[in-house]
Amino acid sequence: MRPLNMIICVKPVPDSRYWDRLSLDPRTKTLRREGIPVIISPLDKNAIEEALRIKEARGGKVSVISMGPQNTTEVLAMAYALGVDEAVLLSDRAFAGADTLATAFALACGISKLGEFDLVLFGNESLDGSTGQVGPQVAEFLDMPSMTRVEKIDFADDDTVRVKSRMEGGYMVTEVKLPAALAVTKDINLPRLMPVFGALWATEKQTKVLSSVDCAVDKEKIGLAGSPTWVPDVANIEMKRKSEIIKGEPAQVARQLVEKLRVAGVLPEA
Amino acid sequence: MPFQLSPAEEMARKIAQEYTEREIIPRRKELMIDDRAMWKEEAVRQNKFGFHLHIVPRQEGGTGIGYVASIVSIEELCAGWPDLNFVTYGEMAYYFAKATGGEVEKKYMPGIIKGDVKATVATTEPSGGSDMLGLRSTARKVDGGWVINGRKCFISEADCTDFIMTLVKTGDPNDPATRGTRSLSAFIIDTGTPGYRIGRMETTMGRREDLAELIFDNVFVPDSHLVGQVGRGIPPVFAAVADTGRMTIFGMLNGITLGSYRCAVKYAKERKLYGRSISEHQAIQHRIADMAIDLEASRLLTYRAGWQRTKGMKVDGELAIAKYFATQAAIRSSLNAINIHGAYGVMEDYMPHHFYKHAPLRIGAGGTDELMKNMIAASALGDANPDLSNKPMEESYFGG
């Protein structure tokens, strides 16, 4: 068994416990996130857990990489608290406003700066955007095979993983040559709790911050400039009940009500 | 003056919060039916997790972050369930093993660091806890050790622990050299020792079979189990009560205040009355404000005491102020939570019921309100930090 170098792409998302405080900015069409604590997107924790388990079994190195403003280091500290070896943050105004494609391009550039690797792991989709696109896109940019909806990873040999992935109405087992990109579901494992010593790891290990210059990326392919998609508009869905008041004698009102419900298809025809 | 937790202390809180959300909150229904087996299972799990290692120096296998990390961890655990804290007993095990040294430290320390060993303190007798000179249990010197006889009561988690530290009489009332405070010695007793047994389990307003009676019937302990010197038993017991006892009680009290606050805020936002959330009513807002004040003031006082203790400062007065205030704040906040919940607040399925029932349990633990006031007054009037080993009992103060 040879040790493996693994990299997990981590997305910081607003803590779901505070979603009642989230609102949409009608001007910028983005979420107002001020004052909302940020966490590691839950499925990314499954990806970290899987990498830690593989490292415990085979040895190697577990790195996490993320893209965001400087305070994303607080989220990466939680990855350190879980036991990862290295955390890298791509942080630069040039990365801002990225859609999934520009995000994937930036992450792929960052990953290629981290040296040799065997596995790149993702949560299958993020808690907030839920597109599920970034993993396969990163794999394309890095020119390697990828699988999504992965719920089990075994090793056929040192250079091949046997992956069980969920499909509609069943599952598929595929052998994939390394290096590969795998996007995992919640069924793959139960992420460990941060141990008490995580409080030391989180505060003593430093996150490495890379700018767009450090990554030597083409600025036309990152951030808003590199995004072929954008959000032209957002709308709040207003949930409102249709109401109508029927007046008259009780028996007559009841007959009218039944008739209206029949017309609406709520009650069967007489 | 820094008014924020260190990054390591903040992370210690997040770690305890995550633990509580996964291991405690989903099991509240089980806890509500007072399942003792589940209680013991949680004792093992918490000790294995290692929250007690925050007070253990790094060179000895702990995190060494300090007492504030311990307090904030217990605060989160007890905001999940008001007395589901076993950190105390891991910390006590470490504290007692270090205080005793020799064979006891050698035997227990590896298990303490691994989270396999817990201990509790047993001083209180039917005559009381604070009046240590009134204790009646005795230890008689024999060849190679001591034989202990007597009875202790109201001992926390005695049925979950591996050893205890107890305080008994070794002095001769007719000998002026071994009377008064010099008449008491502290011993370690392994709970499997012949003659040691658990008697009646007392049910408190918080829990069934909460506190244990301990019976010592010709319990032999070797000389290595004497803590410190003969006739000098009060300082280690007092230090244990002050350092591990009251510090962990701070966390429990803050947890009740925090838990009450959280559930009251949530309920006030959700509960609709006369077409709007009750949080929009000023009467409710004022109660929430009172709870926020109590929470923040308790945290500031208790964290400062923890910080001072981590720095090695002897702070009896500050500790007593923190204990007194945090106790009152927990009682007030849990009652405020009941008031905000209305009739639901007293229902067993709602958390204010449990926070309110547990808050007064902390009055006696680590010293009553009156004892705390004695300590505060002594500190204010210049009688702070007395040398307990040389001071007549009547002039000093002790927690039970």
Image (cartoon, coloured by chain):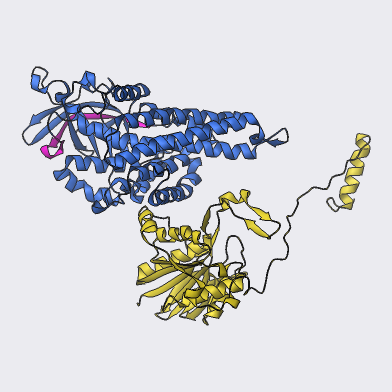
Q: Is B320 placed above or below A26 here? A: above
Tell me where residue B342 sits by quadrant.
top right
Q: Nearer the viewer, residue A51 or A211?
A: A211
Let me know if residue B203 appears in the view. Answer: no
Measured from the top left, where is residue B301 in percent x and y? 40, 35
Which residue corresponds to the image point at 44% horizontal and 50% vertical from the top-left?
B14
Magenta extent: B209-228
Residue B216: in magenta span: yes
Q: Which chain is yellow?
A: A
Q: Assign the C terminus of chain B to one quadrant of the image.
A: top left
The number of numbered discs placed on residues in the rendered structure image is 0
Which residue corresponds to the image point at 47% horizontal and 62% vertical from the top-left?
A189
Q: Which chain is blue?
A: B
Q: Nearer the viewer, residue A174 or B333?
A: B333
Q: Nearer the viewer, residue A194 or B389?
A: B389
User: What is the chief secondary structure element of the magenta stretch?
Assistant: strand
Q: Is B350 placed above or below A9 here? A: above
Q: Nearer the viewer, residue A199 or A95?
A: A95
Describe residue B120's horizontal placement relative to residue A33 as left or right: left
Measured from the top left, where is residue B115 in percent x and y? 30, 49
Q: Is B177 placed above or below B43 here? A: above
Measured from the top left, where is residue B396 in percent x and y? 24, 22
Measured from the top left, where is residue A203 in percent x and y? 38, 56
Describe residue A2's horizontal placement relative to residue A71 as left or right: left
In the displayed orientation, state which residue is furthest to the top: B174
